[in-house]
Image (cartoon, rainbow, N blue to C red):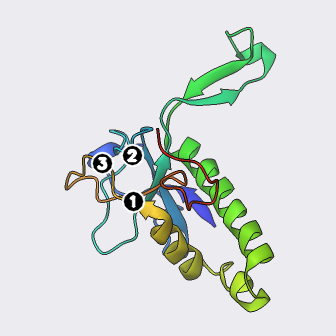
């Protein structure tokens, strides 16, 4: 299970349910991997996973959108979380196609998926002590899952 870490910045720690030790909690970054100001401070001795959660363009119902295309940009750890879930779903699908069944099934356990996501992560380019996030960005090098390269 995944949960948004919280949007309280350095003022508060992770909110429930992200504070549950059986949950993979997700912090937010900008598109460069820098910690979002609203994302909570990384907890020491924890795997603080993060992905983009700022200015995420989302589809909105016609009645709620002020944009004729029915799109709005929103920010928050609750926007980073479904992106992380999508990355995880992709990794599970990839594993089911390319790994032995026992290994692929093991990735459905929290600690195994958390370890895999950590291996996919990088520290942000301008790492600061408050950040301490493992930034998930799958277009890092030519051997990544999408076969793309960082601009």
Secondary structure found at label 3: loop
Q: Position of residue 151 (x, y in %)?
A: 46, 38
Residue 33 numbered mark, or none: 2
Task: Quarter of the image for the N terminus: give it.
Answer: bottom right
Q: CA distance from mark 2 to mark 1?
A: 9 Å
- The residue that appears at 34% across and 44% down in the rendered structure is 34
Q: Is residue 142 left or right of residue 44?
A: right
Q: Are the two marked residues, 2 and 1, in contact with CB atoms closer than 8 angstroms?
A: yes
- The residue that appears at 57% across and 42% down in the rendered structure is 79
Q: CA distance from mark 2 to mark 3?
A: 7 Å
* Residue carrying label 3: 125
Q: Are the two marked residues, 2 and 3, in contact with CB atoms closer than 8 angstroms?
A: yes
Q: Position of residue 87 (x, y in %)?
A: 64, 57
- The residue that appears at 79% across and 16% down in the rendered structure is 62
* Residue carrying label 1: 122
Question: Alpha-carbon neighbours of circle 2 within 10 Å: few (<14), some, or many (≥20)?
Answer: many
Q: Are the two marked residues, 1 and 3, in contact with CB atoms closer than 8 angstroms?
A: no
Q: Going from the N terminus, do you reach mark 2 or mark 1 first? A: 2
Q: Position of residue 45 (x, y in %)?
A: 30, 75
Q: Is residue 65 left or right of residue 132?
A: right
């Amino acid at each position: 299970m995944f949960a948004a870490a919280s949007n309280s910045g350095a003022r508060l720690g992770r909110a429930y349910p992200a504070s549950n030790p059986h949950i993979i909690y997700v912090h937010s970054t900008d598109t460069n991997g820098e910690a979002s100001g609203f994302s909570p401070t990384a907890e020491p001795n924890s795997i603080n996973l993060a992905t983009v959660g700022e200015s995420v363009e989302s589809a909105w119902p016609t009645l709620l959108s002020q944009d004729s295309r029915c799109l709005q940009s929103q920010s928050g750890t609750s926007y980073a979380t479904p992106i992380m879930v999508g990355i995880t779903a992709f990794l599970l699908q990839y594993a089911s196609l390319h790994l032995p069944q026992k290994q692929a099934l093991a990735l459905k356990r929290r600690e195994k998926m958390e370890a895999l996501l950590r291996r996919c992560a990088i520290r942000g380019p301008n790492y600061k002590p408050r950040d301490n996030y493992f930034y998930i960005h799958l277009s890092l090098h030519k051997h990544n899952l999408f076969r793309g390269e960082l601009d």
